[in-house]
Protein backbone atom coordinates (compact mmCIF):
# COMPACT_ATOMS: atom_id res chain seq x y z
CA UNK A 1 0.00 0.00 0.00
CA UNK A 2 1.14 3.51 -0.71
CA UNK A 3 -0.32 6.94 -0.10
CA UNK A 4 0.41 10.48 -1.16
CA UNK A 5 1.98 13.02 1.16
CA UNK A 6 2.97 16.67 0.69
CA UNK A 7 6.48 17.79 1.54
CA UNK A 8 7.05 21.54 1.37
CA UNK A 9 5.71 22.25 -2.15
CA UNK A 10 5.98 18.75 -3.63
CA UNK A 11 3.87 15.59 -3.45
CA UNK A 12 5.43 12.15 -3.11
CA UNK A 13 4.13 8.61 -2.90
CA UNK A 14 5.21 6.75 0.27
CA UNK A 15 4.98 3.12 1.39
CA UNK A 16 2.48 2.43 4.16
CA UNK A 17 -1.11 3.17 5.11
CA UNK A 18 -2.46 6.65 5.73
CA UNK A 19 -3.54 7.04 9.38
CA UNK A 20 -7.32 7.33 9.84
CA UNK A 21 -7.54 9.31 13.07
CA UNK A 22 -6.46 12.88 13.98
CA UNK A 23 -3.80 12.87 16.72
CA UNK A 24 -5.14 16.12 18.16
CA UNK A 25 -8.95 15.86 18.18
CA UNK A 26 -9.41 12.14 17.35
CA UNK A 27 -11.64 12.95 14.36
CA UNK A 28 -11.79 10.25 11.70
CA UNK A 29 -11.91 10.72 7.96
CA UNK A 30 -9.58 12.60 5.66
CA UNK A 31 -6.28 12.75 7.54
CA UNK A 32 -3.25 14.82 6.49
CA UNK A 33 0.34 14.44 7.62
CA UNK A 34 1.61 17.55 9.39
CA UNK A 35 5.38 18.15 9.41
CA UNK A 36 6.42 19.71 12.68
CA UNK A 37 9.88 19.94 11.19
CA UNK A 38 11.24 19.83 7.63
CA UNK A 39 14.62 18.13 8.03
CA UNK A 40 15.32 17.49 4.34
CA UNK A 41 15.46 19.34 1.06
CA UNK A 42 12.84 18.54 -1.58
CA UNK A 43 15.66 17.03 -3.70
CA UNK A 44 16.54 14.55 -0.93
CA UNK A 45 12.87 13.63 -0.51
CA UNK A 46 12.38 13.16 -4.28
CA UNK A 47 15.27 10.66 -4.27
CA UNK A 48 14.06 8.87 -1.12
CA UNK A 49 10.32 9.54 -0.67
CA UNK A 50 10.13 7.64 2.67
CA UNK A 51 12.01 10.55 4.28
CA UNK A 52 8.77 12.55 3.91
CA UNK A 53 7.24 10.49 6.72
CA UNK A 54 9.80 11.66 9.27
CA UNK A 55 8.75 14.30 11.80
CA UNK A 56 5.08 13.95 10.95
CA UNK A 57 1.90 13.69 12.98
CA UNK A 58 -1.54 12.83 11.56
CA UNK A 59 -4.09 15.66 11.76
CA UNK A 60 -7.54 16.39 10.34
CA UNK A 61 -7.88 19.44 8.08
CA UNK A 62 -8.79 21.87 10.88
CA UNK A 63 -6.08 20.75 13.29
CA UNK A 64 -3.55 20.79 10.45
CA UNK A 65 -4.34 24.45 9.69
CA UNK A 66 -3.93 25.32 13.37
CA UNK A 67 -0.68 23.34 13.64
CA UNK A 68 0.75 25.08 10.55
CA UNK A 69 -0.13 28.47 12.05
CA UNK A 70 1.58 27.59 15.35
CA UNK A 71 4.65 26.24 13.53
CA UNK A 72 4.91 29.44 11.47
CA UNK A 73 4.56 31.61 14.58
CA UNK A 74 7.22 29.60 16.41
CA UNK A 75 9.58 29.92 13.44
CA UNK A 76 9.45 33.70 13.69
CA UNK A 77 10.40 34.25 17.33
CA UNK A 78 10.07 38.01 17.18
CA UNK A 79 6.56 37.86 15.75
CA UNK A 80 5.61 35.13 18.21
CA UNK A 81 6.73 37.33 21.13
CA UNK A 82 4.78 40.29 19.72
CA UNK A 83 1.63 38.17 19.50
CA UNK A 84 2.10 36.97 23.08
CA UNK A 85 2.62 40.52 24.38
CA UNK A 86 -0.48 41.72 22.52
CA UNK A 87 -2.57 38.84 23.88
CA UNK A 88 -1.30 39.42 27.44
CA UNK A 89 -2.03 43.14 27.17
CA UNK A 90 -5.53 42.45 25.89
CA UNK A 91 -6.12 40.01 28.76
CA UNK A 92 -4.92 42.57 31.32
CA UNK A 93 -7.15 45.30 29.83
CA UNK A 94 -10.13 42.93 29.88
CA UNK A 95 -9.40 41.99 33.51
CA UNK A 96 -9.06 45.68 34.46
CA UNK A 97 -12.41 46.34 32.84
CA UNK A 98 -13.99 43.49 34.75
CA UNK A 99 -12.48 44.69 38.04
CA UNK A 100 -13.29 48.31 37.13
CA UNK A 101 -9.80 49.67 38.07
ZN1 LIG B 1 -8.22 17.18 14.38
Image (cartoon, grey):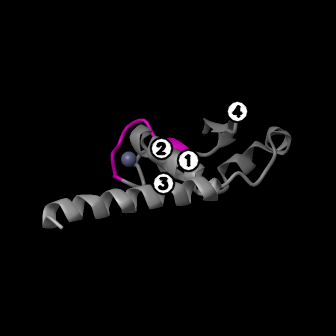
Badge 3, how many Cα within 10 Å: few under 14, some, many 20+? few
Using the image as rendered, state which of residue 73 and residue 31 is in the foreground.
73
- Mark 4 secondary-structure assignment: loop
Using the image as rendered, state which of residue 58 and residue 66 is in the foreground.
66
Query: What residue does disc 1 label?
Result: 34
Give the left or right position of residue 43, taking residue 55 as reference.
right
| Image-quadrant location for residue 94 | bottom left
Q: Position of residue 23 (x, y in %)?
A: 42, 55
Distance in Å between CA atoms under marks 4 and 2? 16 Å
> Mark 2 or mark 1: which comes first in sequence?
1
Distance in Å between CA atoms under marks 3 and 4? 27 Å
Q: Is residue 29 magenta?
A: yes
> Mark 4 or mark 2: which comes first in sequence?
4
Distance in Å between CA atoms under marks 3 and 2? 20 Å
Ligand 1 within 8 Å, label 2 CB: yes
Using the image as rendered, state which of residue 75 and residue 78 is in the foreground.
78
- Mark 3 secondary-structure assignment: helix
Query: What residue does disc 3 label?
Result: 83
Residue 9 got which mark?
4
Instruction: Please give the name of the residue rendered at 14% of the width and 64% of the height, measured from the top-left corner.
Output: 100
Q: Position of residue 69 (x, y in %)?
A: 51, 46
- Mark 2 secondary-structure assignment: helix
Badge 1, how many Cα within 10 Å: few under 14, some, many 20+? many
The answer to whether residue 9 is seen in the rendering is yes
Contact (Cβ within 8 Å) of mark 2 with mark 1 = yes
Ligand 1 within 8 Å, label 3 CB: no
The answer to whether residue 36 is seen in the rendering is no
Residue 64 got which mark?
2
> Mark 3 or mark 4: which comes first in sequence?
4
> Mark 3 or mark 1: which comes first in sequence?
1
Amino acid sequence: MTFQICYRKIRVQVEGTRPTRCAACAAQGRIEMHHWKYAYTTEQVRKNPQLALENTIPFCYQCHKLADAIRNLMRDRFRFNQVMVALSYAAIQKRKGELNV
